[in-house]
Amino acid sequence: MAERDDFEEPDDLGGMEDLSDLDAMDLDEGLTLFPYVRMRRLRRTEAMRRLVRETRVSVDHLIYPLFVVEDSGVRQEIASLPGCYHWSPDRIGEEAQAVAGLGIPAVLLFGIPRDKDAFGSSASDPGGVVPKAIRAIKEAAPELLVVTDVCLCEYTSHGHCGIVSESGEILNDATLEVLANIAVAHADAGADVIAPSDMMDGRVAAIRQALDDVGHDDIAIMAYSAKHASAFYGPFRDAAGSAPAFGDRSTYQMDVANRREALREIMLDIEEGADIVMVKPALAFLDIIREVRNMMDLPLAAYNVSGEYAMVKAAAADWADERRLALEILTSIRRAGADIIITYHAKDAARWLKE
Ligand code: PBG
């Protein structure tokens, strides 16, 4: 070891206002903090790195999406989401037990009905796929939280998230009542959290009121608040059969270019009574996650969406380590400020984090 006696503490920062001036310093003057400061000291061993690690990913933060289809006996791998399955209500209890057994606290349910019509009528059917699945999950794994996605796109023949007028416009206010009815049907069946993903204005307030009116004042709302019109939903739309038959979602979902508008969406949903707010997608929107985190105190969820998962799967087939990629992404989303991460990696991550 070198003698330390000859080291002299600099008595100030060498004229720097703060460390951001470091780049501008004339290194020849010998006023750098090196060799007194050596960042590598705290990276020497795994124990040291554990001690100073700033962000942790735990299974406690994860929500695993589940897709439920009609019929019985179905456990069918989803081509666009390898490792994830379509389940029929009679078999989804198996998956619920597996998820709960891994320590994952919650699932997010998506329904894929047999019957679709222009109004998405099957979505609010108390005997529909999602209510059936909720009851099956509650029976198989009572401790597992059930969050349900509330939207019309999987249930409408046109694939839009709202009611469509004759001229092809997505009607905001007419959609609110339908959404509220779906939320009540899910809560009646035992859902713990309602997650509206349609992006109609005023839907959080409409759902809160409808739930309260029938005595579900203890059921929480996790709002897809800043949901952008993203190309990263492609694999999901394949899995859910929910791609719009005409046009796109850009008159209701947010422009991916907008950050200030995302903050307004978040504030509005908080005012309407959201208990948890969400930024979606996650990976290309980490700046927004951080900004929302800094702005408010509610629990913040981020949706690590299907296209983000598919990219990892594609890269891992040949060029990268899936486990390291996925854990790095989940860590980044937590570091950006998300409390909760909805992710298709949840089951794998739960196993990796245990090792
Ligand atoms: C329904 C909905 C979508 C997703 C969640 N809820 C698709 C969409 O808006 O088109 C996307 C989830 C994912 O890509 O993983 N509106």
Image (cartoon, rainbow, N blue to C red):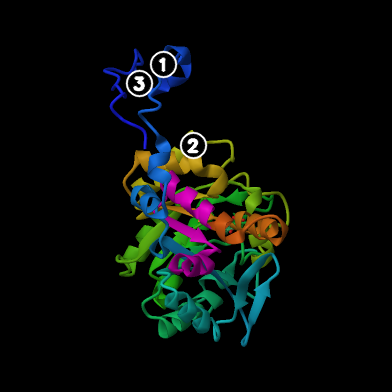
> Spatial distance from mark 2 to mark 1, Cα to Cα?
47 Å
* Quarter of image, res 35: top left
Residue at the disc numbered 2: 261
Q: Nearer the viewer, mark 3 or mark 1?
A: 1
Q: Position of residue 138 (x, y in %)?
A: 41, 80
- Name the secondary structure under disc 3: loop
- Name the secondary structure under disc 2: helix
For marks 2 and 1 on the same chain, the one whose residue lies earlier in the sequence: 1
Q: Is residue 122 left or right of residue 76?
A: left
> Spatial distance from mark 3 to mark 2, Cα to Cα?
33 Å
> Is the Cβ of the residue at disc 3 closer than 8 Å to that at disc 1?
no
What is the number of the mark on residue 30?
A: 1
What is the magenta range?
327-355
Q: Residues within 10 Å of mark 3 (few under 14, many from 20)?
A: few
Residue at (71% x, 69% y) in the render: 79
For marks 3 and 2 on the same chain, the one whose residue lies earlier in the sequence: 3
